[in-house]
Image (cartoon, helix red, strand yellow):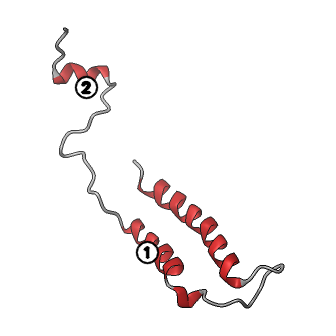
Amino acid sequence: MLRVSRTTRRKLNGGLTMNNTQRRSGWSAWYLLFIVEFVAVLWPPFYNKAEPSWIGIPYFYWYQMLWVIISAVITVVVYLATRE
């Protein structure tokens, strides 16, 4: 079996490994946007009603479906803002 040193591994990986000073912290202010999703969908008084309806769909249902789309957009924004 061939043994490869750490420096050789870094060279083989194209130098993509990070040392301790280059590592990011695990938190960003962008993650606060997820709290908006959490509160909007998991707080029933916001959407626990049937009116106003939209094309015959009660508010309860179209509100939640709208948040599926909004959550996907927020997730993409947070991902793009926090990736390296």
Taking depth in this image into account, of 54 and 10 the one nearest to the observer is 54
Q: Vertical placement of 80 versus 1: above or below?
A: below
Upstream in sequence: badge 1 or badge 2:
2
Residue pictured at 27% horizontal, 52% vertical: 24
Q: Provide the residue designation for mark 2.
A: 10
SS assignment at label 1: helix
Q: Vertical placement of 66 versus 26: above or below?
A: below
In the image, taking residue 43 as reference, residue 64 lies left or right, namely right
In the image, taking residue 3 as reference, residue 80 lies left or right, namely right
In the image, taking residue 81 as reference, residue 55 lies left or right, namely right
Residue 37 pos. (x, y %): 50, 73
Residue pictured at 60% horizontal, 89% vertical: 48
Residue 30 pos. (x, y %): 42, 66
Mark 2 belongs to which amino acid? Arg
Taking depth in this image into account, of 24 and 75 the one nearest to the observer is 75
Mark 1 belongs to which amino acid? Ile
The residue sitting at the right extreme is 55
Image quadrant containing the N terminus: top left
Quarter-of-image position of residue 52: bottom right
SS assignment at label 2: helix
Residue pictured at 65% horizontal, 90% vertical: 49
Q: Are marks 1 and 2 in contact (CB under 8 Å)?
A: no
Q: Provide the residue designation for mark 1.
A: 35
Residue 29 pos. (x, y %): 37, 68
Cα gap from disc 1 to disc 2, whole angstroms: 38 Å
Taking depth in this image into account, of 40 and 49 the one nearest to the observer is 49
The residue sitting at the top extreme is 1
Residue pictured at 54% horizontal, 91% vertical: 45
